[in-house]
Amino acid sequence: MDTRNGVANSIMVVGQDQLAYSVACSLLDGDHPVLLLTDDRGAAEHYVRKEVHDCTKLAVITDWPKNITARLVILVTPDKLLAKQHLISQVENRTAEDTIIAVNTECIGLEEIQTDSTRPTRIFGLNWSYPVHRTFFAEIISNAETDPATLAQLEKWVNVYGKKDACTVRNGFSIRARMMAAMLREGLYLVENGFASIESVDRACRNDAGFYLSFVGNFRYMDLMGTYAYGMVMKDLNRELSNMVTLPKILQEKKDKGETGMAKGKGFYTYSVEEKGYWDRIFRAFSQEIQQLIKKYPHESFDH
């Protein structure tokens, strides 16, 4: 593992948490050199050594270099506009005109992120699913400002070196975030109105959608089952689905109490130190197994 200012022809990753480390692992698994800028070198190196067999193409730095030679810089940031724009400015001041900048974004539109940029045509949204190096998900977000040739280059890098089956969005916002938010809103609505418990909603998601979504997406599944039945169900149900526009009460209460998830020991469930370790271990094992299962049944394997 190289801790100098870089490895030749690197893709640069900037981030402070396990999501950023996992992005680096995914690129290393694709046999591409990575320059990782992070505050905690020890934590980053420990994570990567645990997950990747060959770390020789990784360089870890803790300060911004004067010049960045990477042609692609991936930013992993909190979903706050000013934080994203600040990092983009840092990169633009250190890179060549043709450098591509990709930043994760869930609730902020790409047009807002591009504001004040000197190279808006080369800035993209790029979302991941954790653990990045065990999943095939990547979401590339573009818009009317996007240069088509640059988009094609980013798609190639993400799919080849990141080993992803990326989806590309052309309207400047995340489709993953919207679909997830719609499902969570309905689940929270059912819990808050006494239709089902948290445990029952989780079981319904895992044992139905969770059973088929690793095999096909919703549209292909409707084709398999017959679209007419789903149309009839939606015709009756759509008028009754939640349309709340504010944060659900139960989620606001969790936020106010600092019950923000497993890392804090409590979210929708309560976790001891031992339980947190248990869930971490089995999630890693599950991710490896499901990765192999998805590879065994590719969704576009039929030879016409």
Image: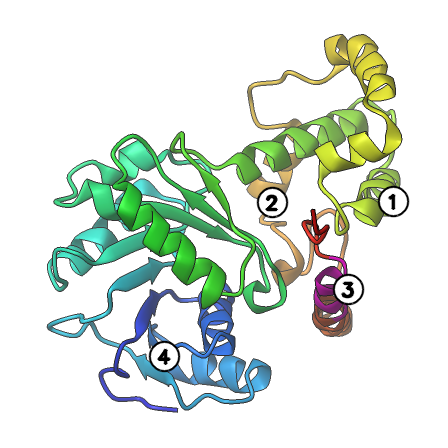
Is 49 covered by the magenta stretch? Answer: no
Q: Which mark is residue 277?
A: none
Label 2 sits on residue: 257
Q: Write down the residue under mark 4.
A: 33
- Marks 4 and 1: CB-CB under 8 Å? no
199 is higher (above) or lower (below) than 159: above
Residue drawn at x 21%, y 58% as measured from the top left:
99
Foreground: disc 1 or disc 2:
1
x and y, in percent, of residue 269 in the image: 77, 52
Q: CA distance from mark 4 to mark 3?
A: 27 Å
**Marked residue nearer the N-terminal end (1 or 2):** 1
Identify which amino acid the numbered label 2 is placed on: Lys
**Pointer 2 local density, CA inside 10 Å: few below 14, some 14–19, many at least 20:** few
Depth check, front residue: 183 or 231: 231
User: In the rendered view, does 46 fall on the left or right side of 122?
Assistant: right
Q: What span is in magenta?
A: 289-297
Amino acid found under the numbered disc labelled 1 = Arg
Between circles 2 and 4, the one closer to the viewer is: 4
Name the residue carrying label 1.
Answer: 203
| Circles 1 and 2: CB atoms closer than 8 Å | no
Q: Secondary structure at mark 3?
A: helix
First along the sequence among labels 4 and 1: 4
Q: Nearer the viewer, residue 1 or 279?
A: 1
Is 292 magenta? The answer is yes
- Residue in front for this viewpoint, 147 or 91: 147
Disc 3 marks which residue?
293
Query: Which amino acid type is marked by label 3?
Result: Leu
Q: Position of residue 69 (x, y in %)?
A: 18, 71
Q: Residues under labels 1 and 3: Cα distance?
A: 21 Å
